Amino acid sequence: MQKIIVGNWKMNQKLSDIGAFFTEMSKIKMELRVKAMIAPQSIHIPILKEMAFTLGNIYVGAQNVAATSNGAFTGEISAESLRDLEVDFVIIGHSERRQLFFESNEVIQKKVAQAMTHSLPIILCIGESLSEKEKQKTLDVLFEQLSSALLNSSAVDWSQLTIAYEPIWAIGTGKTASFQEVIEVHEKIKEWCRQHLKVEVPILYGGSVKPENAPQFLSSELIDGLLVGGASLRAQDFKAICMSAPR
């Protein structure tokens, strides 16, 4: 399977930054050994769609989607609107949404249902906190997040699903889960998907991913790709991570 590299730009990148990023990317002859994807701020999606189309090998998605279909929800963006924009994917359940915006498992399940109803490919983020890890509750937390988000949905197309394991304690902290830790967790997530969804689901790793540690993570068959934060803001770093996938 082709490795997947997702750049989550979060609330970063002005228009000038985006222009500089794609100008630099256009100078780089990046072989299509990975599926490269970027999630910008929602207001920049149409601009990235145009630039990515010109470049020819980057998919563009959204960082979030509303839990409801439409109505008086100021500031939200619906799955239907994202479909109109022809986004290639949507990230749901990122740890920052769970922690900073208090999104519960129930809210995330509703977002998954909205995305699936409108045929939007999903990257579902799951992860444990440092205290949960120290109490050896990692798998309990992950399986609860998966069950709540996926097993209660009536509209299902698991071919549209990707899961990103992002330990909360390793996001933006400079800490990185050890290679062995990540491998063991990915193996358990894959087993859960086979048992409950009856399909093979791509599993990404996210958590302080950099050009320096990306090659090791991408060397494993159990890691189908990476969800990259800060390192995806710089074209040279993003390119280096994409090019570090095995041939």
Image (cartoon, rainbow, N blue to C red):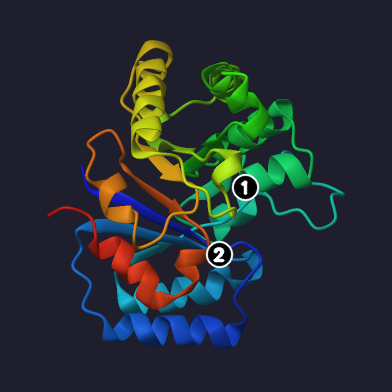
Distance (Cα) linking label 2 and label 1: 20 Å
What residue sits 70% from the left and 54% below the top?
A: 77
Q: Nearer the viewer, residue 106 or 116?
A: 106
Q: Nearer the viewer, residue 150 or 175?
A: 175
Q: Nearer the viewer, residue 52 or 133?
A: 133
What residue sits 52% from the left and 40% below the top?
A: 166
Residue 181: percent from the left, percent from the top?
40, 31
Q: Quadrant of residue 220?
A: top left
Q: Earlier in the sequence, mark 2 or mark 1?
A: 2
Residue 237: percent from the left, percent from the top?
38, 71
* Left or right: residue 29 compared with residue 91: left
Q: Residues within 10 Å of mark 1 (few under 14, many from 20)?
A: many
* Left or right: residue 120 compared with residue 81: left
The answer to whether residue 163 is seen in the rendering is yes
Q: Where does label 1 land, which residue? A: 79
* Left or right: residue 7 compared with residue 135: left
User: SS of the residue at dot 1?
Assistant: helix
User: SS of the residue at dot 2?
Assistant: loop
Mark 1: amino acid: Ala
Q: Residue furthest left?
A: 247
Q: Quadrant of residue 102?
A: top right
Mark 2: amino acid: Trp
Residue 165: percent from the left, percent from the top?
48, 37
Q: Nearer the viewer, residue 186 or 125?
A: 186
Q: Where does label 2 land, which residue? A: 9
Q: Residue furthest top?
A: 195
Q: Quadrant of the N terminus?
A: top left
